[in-house]
């Protein structure tokens, strides 16, 4: 579940809450592209809103306890919105 979307330069961040394997909710910081790069790919400040249910894939930080990753893909199943753009 999306908690916060920081649309900024550089980089943008998506903060989500997701349960771990024991059911405890963890807050994750997901690094995305800079706002200018996202804007060029059709992502705007209002594209994501708190409460959105998201499916995110990415590259995790070396230390799993940090709960951070670099975003690879993001999707919002309720309406089919999806981003699979490239990092440039």
Image (cartoon, rainbow, N blue to C red):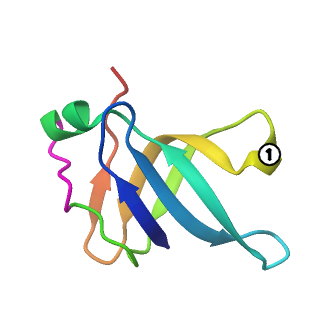
Q: Which residues are magenta?
A: 41-46
Taking the spot 85% from the left edge, 75% from the top edge, the residue there is: 22
> What main secondary structure does the magenta stretch of the protein show?
loop
Residue at screen point 14% across, 45% down = 42
For this orientation, the residue located farthest to the top is: 88
Q: Quadrant of residue 59?
A: top right
**In the rendered image, which residue does mark 1 sit on?**
64
Q: Quadrant of residue 54?
A: bottom left
Give x and y (percent) for residue 58: 56, 42
Does residue 26 belong to the magenta stretch?
Answer: no
x, y percentage for residue 9?
31, 33
Using the image, determine if residue 15 lies above or below residue 80: above
Please state the horizontal and vertical placement of residue 25, each as a whole percent of the image.
Answer: 71, 75
Residues 40 and 5: in front is: 5
Residue 42 falls inside the magenta stretch: yes
SS at badge 1: helix
Of residues 83 and 31, which is closer to you in this image? 31
């Amino acid at each position: 579940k999306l908690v916060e979307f920081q649309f900024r330069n550089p980089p943008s961040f998506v903060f989500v809450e997701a349960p771990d394997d024991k059911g405890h909710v963890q807050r994750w910081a997901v690094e995305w592209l800079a706002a200018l790069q996202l804007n060029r790919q059709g992502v705007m400040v209002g594209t994501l809103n708190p409460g959105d249910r998201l499916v995110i894939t990415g590259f995790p930080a070396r230390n799993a306890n940090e709960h951070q990753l670099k975003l690879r893909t993001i999707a919002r199943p309720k309406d089919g919105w999806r981003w699979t753009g490239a990092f440039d």
